[in-house]
Image (tube, rainbow, N blue to C red):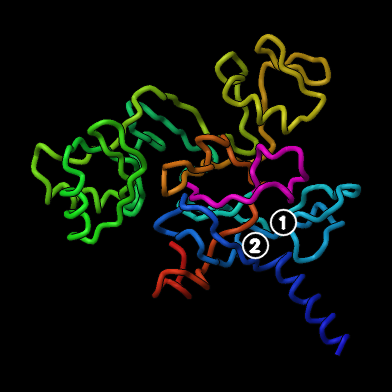
Amino acid sequence: MGKVILVTLLIVFCIRTFFIEPYTVSSAQMETALINGERILIDKTAYGIRMPITILTVPFTFGKYSSIIELPYKRIFESDVKRNDIVLFNNPLDTLKPLDKGELLLSRCVALPGDSIHVKDGIFRINERDYVCSPDVTNEYFIKTPNRKYLAEIINELEISASSTRVQADTMFLRLNKLDAFILNKSLPDSMQVTTMVDTVSNYKFLIPAKGKTINLNTETIAIYKQIILTEKGPKAKIVDNKLYISGEEQKRYTFTDNYYWMLSDNTLNSSDSRSLGFIPFKNIIGKGRFIWYSPVKGRSLSTIK
């Protein structure tokens, strides 16, 4: 009996390490594609199997390990991340821990290596084309109304999923997806419409780094890619007065050694994605969300993640 249990645990450990790993959604940032509390299966073979780095780890735990021995990063059967994949990855800013022990985050890949991103007046563009979000993507809307009871009655009557984020004077802020916002506005008078929040201040444009891509170094490119360069080159790289030095020698150009991706969560409120984390390296990517095997919402279990 003891041998059977030991063999069974070993098989499960190997499956979780190399092939399939369960993950519990612990925030609302991917709603409504994934609901807080849902349990999903991560396909760790989708982009190639990332070999363990921290080998002194207590099985079936995430936080108990020793970093005395760390193996170099290696991935076998490597495959590209696809646009719109929902991806599990280690937080690239969690640098105090080994790569494979960093904070786990789940988000949607919207831009690939070599893509251009341009944000202007609240419009998000990829390769100079407007990024079209799913109707299920949630945003913060505001509505000026002295009659909150009337608004609540309309929302309940339409069976719309809306939650109030805050109230300021006569303005109420709601979290809605685009479809529900459209339906709600059709039922409200013209003087009482929900309007999305538009950021017209944060305007920027840049390229997503691709492995083998070489860029000219100047004040602008160093500002954008500084963290990537320092992470890739380690202690031998220094940036002084907007100039890159590697092993003490000034560099005029730089070639990236990894592919990077841009992740955006479906729920734009309080989300941990590329807007706060920056570029996501391929080496940080663990796998692709495949199936929902448990959901607190009836009818969503055993369904494919989209």
Dots 2, 1 in contact, CB < 8 A: yes
Q: Quadrant of residue 45?
A: bottom right
Q: What's the mark number on residue 202?
A: none
Disc 2 marks which amino acid? Lys
Residue 267 in the image, given as x and y percentages of width and height: 41, 47
Q: Image check: 154 left or right of 31?
A: left
Tell me the quarter of the image containing the N terminus: bottom right
- Report helix, strand or loop for mark 1: strand
Seen in the picture, residue 15 relative to 224 is either above or below; the reply is below
- Report helix, strand or loop for mark 2: loop
Tell me the quarter of the image containing the C terminus: bottom left
Disc 1 marks which amino acid? Arg
Instruction: Name the residue that disc number 1 marks.
Output: 50
Instruction: Name the residue that disc number 2 marks.
Output: 44
Q: CA distance from mark 2 to mark 1?
A: 8 Å
| Region of the chain picked out in magenta, as a range | 90-109
